[in-house]
């Protein structure tokens, strides 16, 4: 249920109404907009008398919401959420008109590699550095990442370049190792690991939540709800392609998900064209299309030597290729924002 307050409502009036809602054992989420204040109510609202609320002098309207996702719902929070990551001069904003590119290798392989790639992508305009320390691979015999050592190398690259770091967590047992990671990524395979999502909801770091291989938008939003219901509202949604019957691409990049998610939710939406296509030559056109579709950012894999990458070299751009993509993206953004 949402209650929209009339303009001119005093702080005391609002606080009294919120106090009453909480006395009814309801969780209250307040969204302060430029033109109106929206109060979202979560819990058993069946006993709340809508006619009584509509009769209050300070209430503009009251609406019951049937969608199971509440915190992530745009009707609860009409204004776009802006997520901040990093510190000081290196702080980055995503959402609400702030566009950011996250770039870096699929896997952290060595200090030389991660620092070299970090410097290159920063020079081309990337705002955040991605790199896998823990790698969920289909085969147990494939490279599984450098794990704790990989995290340390990401921290070294952050110190060298100032770029905030984004890396994937796979288990609740790793939480202590991720305390200073700027954005914690939940991969497609863990999108419905609900115990992990609950634990991440108790943190205050931004969470980048990737869509599962065969999940609906509703299921993605419900996973975001698990995080937000625990108190962490700093969630970024990521479309990374869904599994289909076609074999020409690794997955099918569902770009219709971008405007649809932004219609349903206030959370930022970014796109990962690297994992979606699985082919480096397709990253550029799909990245450009994702920007034109209204995404709030991109996640692109970049490696200084893709043919010898320990994971996903086929979908990785070289620094020179990434620079060209970044320039094209800036052109499209200038047209969209004109």
Image (spheres, rainbow, N blue to C red):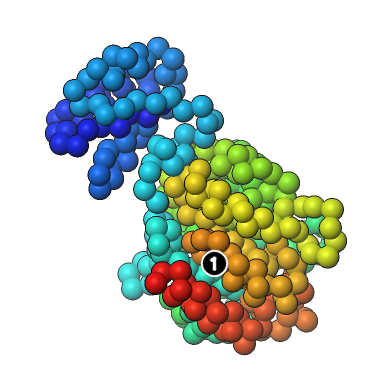
Left-right relation of 221 to 212 = left
Depth check: 50 or 88 in front? Answer: 50
Which residue is located at x 44 percent, y 15 percent? 46
Q: Position of residue 76 (x, y in %)?
A: 40, 37
Q: Position of residue 249 (x, y in %)?
A: 79, 64
Q: Position of residue 238 (x, y in %)?
A: 58, 55
Q: Is residue 111 visible?
A: no
| Quarter of the figure with the N terminus | top left
- SS category of the residue bearing label 1: helix
Q: Position of residue 188 (x, y in %)?
A: 67, 52
Which residue is located at x 51 percent, y 61 percent? 294
| Quarter of the figure with the C terminus | bottom left
- Residue 65 against residue 216 in the figure, above or below: above
Which residue is located at x 75 percent, y 59 percent? 251
Depth check: 160 or 29 in front? Answer: 29
Q: Which residue is mark 1?
A: 291
- Residue 245 against residue 296 in the figure, above or below: above
- Residue 66 against residue 157 in the figure, above or below: above
Left-right relation of 115 to 31 = right
């Amino acid at each position: 249920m949402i209650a929209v307050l009339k303009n001119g409502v005093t702080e005391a009036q609002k606080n009294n109404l919120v106090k009453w809602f909480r006395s009814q054992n309801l969780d209250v989420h307040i969204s302060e907009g430029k033109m109106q204040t929206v109060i979202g109510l979560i819990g058993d609202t069946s006993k709340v008398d809508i006619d009584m609320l509509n009769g209050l002098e300070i209430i503009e309207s009251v609406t019951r919401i049937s969608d199971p996702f509440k915190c992530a719902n745009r009707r609860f929070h009409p204004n776009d959420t802006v997520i901040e990551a990093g510190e000081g001069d290196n702080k980055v904003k995503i959402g609400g008109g702030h566009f950011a590119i996250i770039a870096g290798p699929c896997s952290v392989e060595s200090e030389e590699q991660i620092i070299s790639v970090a410097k290159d992508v920063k020079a081309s305009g990337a705002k955040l550095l991605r790199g896998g320390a823990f790698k969920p691979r289909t085969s147990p015999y494939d490279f599984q990442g450098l794990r704790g050592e990989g995290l340390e190398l990401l921290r070294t690259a952050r110190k060298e370049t100032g770029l905030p770091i984004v890396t994937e967590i796979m288990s609740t047992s790793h939480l202590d190792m991720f305390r200073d990671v700027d954005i914690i990524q939940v991969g497609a395979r863990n999108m419905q690991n609900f115990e992990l999502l609950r634990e991440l909801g108790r943190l205050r770091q931004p969470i980048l939540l990737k869509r599962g291989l065969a999940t609906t938008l509703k299921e993605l939003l419900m996973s975001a709800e698990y995080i937000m219901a625990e108190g962490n509202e700093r969630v970024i949604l990521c479309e990374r392609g869904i599994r289909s019957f076609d074999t020409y691409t690794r997955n099918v990049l569902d770009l219709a998900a971008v405007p649809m998610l932004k219609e349903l939710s206030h959370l930022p939406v970014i796109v990962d064209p690297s994992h979606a296509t699985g082919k480096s030559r397709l990253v550029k056109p799909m990245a450009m299309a994702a920007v034109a579709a209204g995404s709030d950012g991109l996640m692109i894999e970049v490696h200084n030597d893709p043919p010898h990458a320990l994971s996903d070299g086929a979908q990785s751009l070289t620094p020179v290729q990434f620079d060209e993509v970044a320039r094209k993206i800036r052109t499209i953004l200038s047209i969209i924002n004109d």
